[in-house]
Image (cartoon, helix red, strand yellow):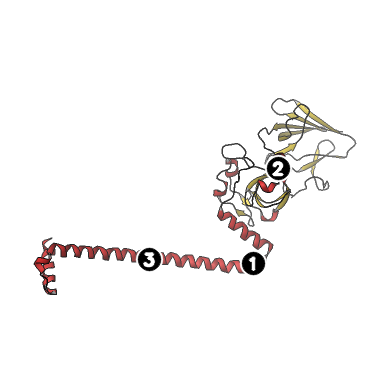
Amino acid sequence: MVNICFYDNETQELLGRISKHHLQEAVIPAYSDDYKVFLNRRFETRPDIYYWEVVSQNINDGTVSIYLLPDLDKLPSYGEKAIQFNKHKRTTHFLKQYNIVEVDFGHHVALLEGGSNQKKNTNYLSNLLQYELHKRRPCVVLSVDAHSIQVLPLTTKIKPENLKLSPASLKELAIRYREKSSYFIPSMIQSVSAFRVFPPRLAAGSYADHGKKIPIAEWDKSRIEELLAIRFKPSLKAIIDPLKAEVRKLQTERAKNLDTLNSNKDFITAQETEIDDLKGLIARIGVEELGEQGDRETVIEQLKIVYSGN
């Protein structure tokens, strides 16, 4: 027999127990210190809470003790909000392409065998399997329909195929999103239920309202579009790469032309200054001294006298 016991981590109160009899293997959460694990459970003593964070997990002679903390400020999913707001509303009312959201992909499970031996799940298909996307993570919305959302997941793991998200796209979000660099995972684009999608946490600490749009930077939008074009139609790369090279060439030429233009402006300014100085000298000589019929040599001689006097 395997007993799975759930405790409130703060009060140590037993919230509930599941007993499994005559099973060779029991499915339990695959807890890890490396990332947060969340469970959906309703307990008779806490009927108002159904979303819990797993703080720790102990296994002793067939008893699995799971210690939980309630996520009290968690908002409803976009799917739930659409139902609450108006049964005729859909997620398209709240979400737009290139918004940042949080998606709960669920948690991995482990198989408890013999009361203490754990192994990875490779057979129970109703649960997440190894190498499938898991945990709660930020994502970028690619498309939205009435009940599902296609998302581009983000990760902090650096891989050659992952593209870095610019810090400008995360500036409104909580510090935990910005502690490390985030990268797009193009190989893990997913379509998920709107009931898995939630508003992200903001810099002030609270979750964003469902109506608040948090779009990524324009630069990142362009990079995603190029990424998707190349990924789903590789032949476009042969077109895009020469165009990018031509753009770089034009940018270089533009920079040179701007330098030349600025140099010409400086030269013209200097010439205009000299002309103004000459006009000033002529004004100081006066028409009476030069005479209306003064020839060129007379003007030059008068200018020399005035100039030498300065």
- What number is the disc on residue 82? 2
In the picture of the structure, the residue carrying the numbered disc 3 is 261
Q: Quadrant of the N terminus?
A: top right
Residue drawn 54% across and 67% down? 245
Whichever of labels 3 and 1 marks the residue nearer the N terminus, that label is 1
Please give left or right for residue 12 compared with residue 257 in the image. right
- Alpha carbon separation for disc pair 3 and 2: 57 Å
- Alpha carbon separation for disc pair 3 and 1: 37 Å
Asked which quadrant contains residue 281, the reply is bottom left
Q: Position of residue 233 (x, y in %)?
A: 68, 64
- Alpha carbon separation for disc pair 2 and 1: 38 Å
- What number is the disc on residue 236? 1
Q: Callout 2 environment at 10 Å: few (<14), some (14 to 19), or many (20+)?
A: many
Whichever of labels 2 and 1 marks the residue nearer the N terminus, that label is 2
Q: Nearer the viewer, residue 222 or 186?
A: 222
Whichever of labels 3 and 2 marks the residue nearer the N terminus, that label is 2
Tell me the amino acid under the disc marked 3: Leu
Tell me the amino acid under the disc marked 2: Ala
Provide the secondary structure element on which disc 1 rests: helix
Q: Position of residue 260 (x, y in %)?
A: 38, 67
Asked which quadrant contains residue 240, the reply is bottom right
Q: Nearer the viewer, residue 26 or 49?
A: 49
User: Can residue 135 be seen in the rendering of this structure?
Assistant: no
